[in-house]
Amino acid sequence: MDALAARGNRSRAYPLAGNAIEFDRVTLARGGRVVLDGVSAAIRAGEFIGVFGPNGSGKSTLLRAILGLLPPLSGAIRVFGDPPARGSRSAGYLPQQRAALVDLPICGWDFVASAWRGDRWGLPLVSRRGREEVARAIARVEAQTLVQRPLSQLSGGELQRLLLAQALLGEPRLLLLDEPLISLDPHFQQAVISLVRDIQLAGEITVLFTAHDPNPLLGVMDRVLYLGNRRAAIGMVDDVITDQVLSRLYAMPIEVLRINDRIVVVAGHGPVEAEAHRHDV
Amino acid sequence: MFEYDFMRTAFLAGGVVAVAAGAVGFFLVLRNLTFAGHALSHVGFAGATGSVLIGVGALWGLLAFTVAAAVAMGLIGDRLRQRDIAVGIVLSLALGLGVLFLALYTAGAGEATAILFGNLLAIAPGTFWSLVALSAATLLALGVISRPLLFATLEPELAEAKGVSLRLVSVLFLAIVAVAVAEAAQVVGVLLVFALMVGPPAAAQRLVSRLGAGLALAVGLAIIETWGGIALAYATDWPTTFWIVLLSCLVYFASIFKPAIARSTTSHG
Ligand SMILES: Nc1ncnc2c1ncn2[C@@H]1O[C@H](COP(=O)(O)OP(=O)(O)O)[C@@H](O)[C@H]1O
Ligand SMILES: [Mg+2]
């Protein structure tokens, strides 16, 4: 069990007391199949957590459970001390599914604004306060020049920034970002990462950031949560991204190489991340 | 032409229906549900012929069938991959039933033609007031759900996380679509509901990208096309439906060429 159950006790002490998220022997299932089995983990308020794992290991499922969209089969989840509540304002979310957005004829501003108190009944009119919030979120992702254009005319990376703006609406204490780097070139990946890092540090926000490749996040993550084989390991990068832990999570022999400060995860037949990217759509 | 009662009724009824059809159609197109709208109108055909057979006004049979079918579609859910197939099969069953009801109802082909292609110039005063009430109800209901509907349409995953019930919104919206379809069928007939509910919003969404402007333009185009159709029918003696459908097509195809023009004039940036 050793590192698999690691709670990152080597990590530095945080000024913020308390845990943002606690998983206590949580079992999650999708479509009748168990995806995570008896996972325990604690994430402190204000931490930046990189969430990794092979495709289908349950990264998105985990985020949905934290949002209260998927009740655990057993075990308990706590978000800021309470069970997850659907519709909670404390969490900002950037979903992974976004293919449907690509050909929308709606301009960026209206798109971002649709998420402002979008759960209320009535007309989609945005109050003055709402307009200020929307404008601020758009400014934070530096998308002011994009929002007059319809989504159908935006690139993948530009769309990603608008989605991030939506996630930031309403000053959430917790940011759940599901694969925000997909379809971004390295330059924009770095831009998104440092943007999220700035926002996180300025507001002492807890961030769960799923990705395929840990390398772009090495400088900003406080700890990693690695999923695989229905289990999870949480801890410092050096404790979790190791031959031993990953071999167990991938259920096959894995070798972790360090090349010029980059981590390369190699399975029997080649680098694992390249494999993962190929399967992703 | 306004000296005739039936012309005044046609303009008023057409306008009232166009407002509801344009507004509902705007969200229908945004949600990529145009096939569902099309199917609903055909399901309505069975309802209309059935109610004529038992001696009830065609509008009520239309309404009953379209609303029932809409709720069923909403419950099946957007995510079911087989949904379009299921809808298509139910739709053909409904059309088959319509044919049966027509065969049993021996009195007239005129009634069937009116159901299939609409007859705006022969709207009875009772039907007119029913249309006004239905349009008002449609717009009111749409107003109540439009905010979560928009959120659920643009960002379903996020909307769900923020507490919007996708299923509820979907069922309510399809019920509203069903009523609008039944109304639009009075104007252009069940076969051509597309012209009123899809043509104007689709053109509007090509022309503007602001939501409010798009919605207003969709409604405006629906009204203009309807009124234009009636006026042209009066002038030519050709069917109103033909003119409305023709205008709808022309406007839509004109809107397709707009971006090309805009790009060619601003391409130096
Ligand atoms: N809507 C769904 N219905 C049933 N099973 C699903 C659904 N979404 C995902 N799954 C399954 O749940 C598992 C975890 O998926 P997911 O959380 O999306 O993985 P990841 O985000 O790590 O790639 C996979 O085996 C996937 O096939
Ligand atoms: Mg995923």
Image (cartoon, coloured by chain):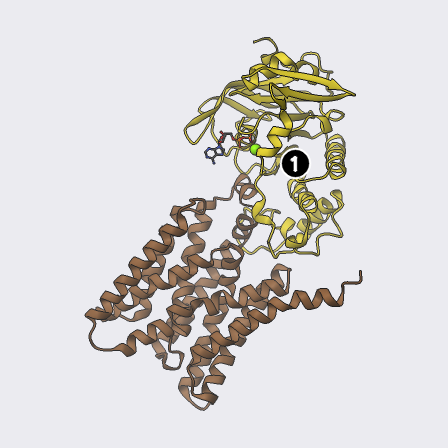
In the image, residue A167 sits, relative to residue B101, either above or below, namely above
Residue A200, quarter of picture: top right
Q: Is residue B246 left or right of residue B59?
A: right
Front-most of B145 and A230? A230
Q: Secondary structure at mark 1?
A: loop
Tell me the crowding category of disc 1: few under 14, some 14 to 19, or many 20 or more residues within 10 angstroms, Cα based: some
Front-most of B106 and A27? B106
Q: Position of residue A194 (x, y in %)?
A: 76, 34
Task: Find ligand 2 in the image and state its quadrant.
Answer: top right
In the image, residue A35 sits, relative to residue B49, either above or below, namely above
Mark 1 — residue? A172
Q: Position of residue A51 (x, y in %)?
A: 63, 26
Q: Amino acid at mark 1?
A: Pro
Front-most of A134 and B27? B27
What tint does the image give chain B?
brown
What tint does the image give chain A?
yellow
* Residue at 41% over, 73% down: B188
